[in-house]
Amino acid sequence: MRTGSWDEELASSLIGLFILFAIVALVIVIWASVQVVNILLNGFALAPKSKVLWLSLSAVIAFAALALLTGTAWWLVGSALAFIVLVVCAKAIELTHAPLFQREPSREELLGEVVHLDQWWQAA
């Protein structure tokens, strides 16, 4: 025989469902964070002297510092937008360095690399 009422059963099942959704959301957030860090590291590794990446990273840091110093939410919004720009630029750099977007070398270039037609003493 059951000892609880249907209200208690409903409340416990809703709490269990909420906990399940919270765990799934936490896993998704952790996965997305790892993906963003991977994109940023690949972008900085492929183009460490990219002025766009460094400028957007400094904008993120500057807006976050201003948000902490002033306590207004507008600087935090600016920091979030600058972070989105940083991730998009890093992904663009990653895509431009992908082998899919590289042009195929011509027959002459391949022949020159194999046979070494452009020797250093001929350049002088």
Image (cartoon, rainbow, N blue to C red):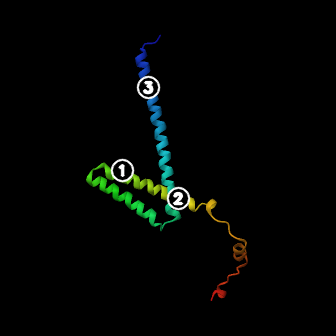
Q: Which amino acid does label 3 sit on?
A: Leu
Image height of 119 relative to 17, above or below = below
Residue linked to disc 2: 92
Local secondary structure at mark 3: helix
Identify the mark nearer the N-term, 1 or 2: 1
Q: Which residue is drawn at 68% across and 82% down?
A: 118
Count residues near mark 3 (Cα–Cα under 10 Å), then give few for <14, some for 14-19, many for 20+: few
> Mark 1 sits on what residue?
77
Q: How far apart are marks 3 and 2 (CA)?
A: 43 Å
When the figure is inspected, residue 118 is found, relative to residue 34, above or below; the finding is: below
Residue receiving disc 3: 14
Screen quadrant of the C terminus: bottom right
User: For the residues carrying marks 3 and 2, which lies nearer the camera in this image?
Assistant: 2
> Farthest bottom residue?
124
71 to the left or right of 111: left
Does residue 101 appear left or right of residue 60 in this picture? right
Please report whichever mark, 3 or 2, sits nearer to the chain's N-terminal start. Answer: 3
Quadrant hosting residue 86 = bottom left
Q: Which amino acid does label 1 sit on?
A: Val
Q: Residue at x 42, y 60 (%)?
A: 56
Precedes in sequence: disc 3 or disc 1: 3
Residues packed near mark 2 inside 10 Å, few (<14), some (14 to 19) or many (20 plus): some
Where does residue 80 sit, x and y in percent of width and height?
Answer: 39, 51
Three-letter amino acid code at the position of disc 2: Ala
- Disc 3 versus disc 1: nearer the observer: 1
- Residue 52 visible? The answer is yes
Report if the CB atoms under discs 3 and 1 are less than 8 Å apart.
Answer: no
